[in-house]
Image (tube, grey):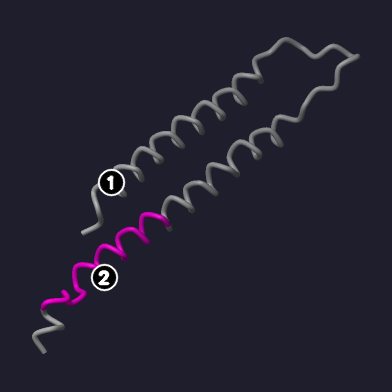
């Protein structure tokens, strides 16, 4: 079983990243409702902005997945490892 502080820290990080990504995507999609661009200002391409908002979300999801798997693996290895008293008894 993984340690409680590591698990809590992981889920707090997941929640923080989820909130940040939701706000980023919301701001990108909300920018599409702006009034028409003036000719003296260049207009950003919406598809590129959406890509740059979604790419970090995918990267963070992969990072969080592998972190969770590492925490679970380390906890499982710790649970099956022999204790020092069991090794000394041999």
Q: Position of residue 76 (x, y in %)?
A: 24, 66
Marks 2/1: CA–CA distance: 17 Å
At 58% from the left edge and 40% from the top edge, which residue is drawn? 54
- For the N terminus, the quadrant is bottom left
Where is residue 14 shown, x and y percent of the image?
40, 40
Q: Position of residue 12 (x, y in %)?
A: 36, 37
Residue at which label 1 appears: 5
Kind of element beneath mark 1: helix
Side of 84 where 21 appears, left or right: right
Q: Please name whichever residue, 6 or 11, is drawn nearer the observer in this view of the structure.
A: 6
Q: Where does the magenta region start and end?
A: 67-85
| Residue with the most extreme bottom position | 90
Helix, strand or loop: magenta stretch: helix
Nearer-the-camera pick, 2 or 64: 2
Residue 80, magenta (yes or no): yes
Question: Seen in the image, is 85 located left or right of residue 33?
Answer: left
Q: How many residues crowd around disc 2 within 10 Å: few (fewer than 14), some, or many (20 or more)?
A: few
State whether residue 71 is above or below residue 84.
above
């Amino acid at each position: 079983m993984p340690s409680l502080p590591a698990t809590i820290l992981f889920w707090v990080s997941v929640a923080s990243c989820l909130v940040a990504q939701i706000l980023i995507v919301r701001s990108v999609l909300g920018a599409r409702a702006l009034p028409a661009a003036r000719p003296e200002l260049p207009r950003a391409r919406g598809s590129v902005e959406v890509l740059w908002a979604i790419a970090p979300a995918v990267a963070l999801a992969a990072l969080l997945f592998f972190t969770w798997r590492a925490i679970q693996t380390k906890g499982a290895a710790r649970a099956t490892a022999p204790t020092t008293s069991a090794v000394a008894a041999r």
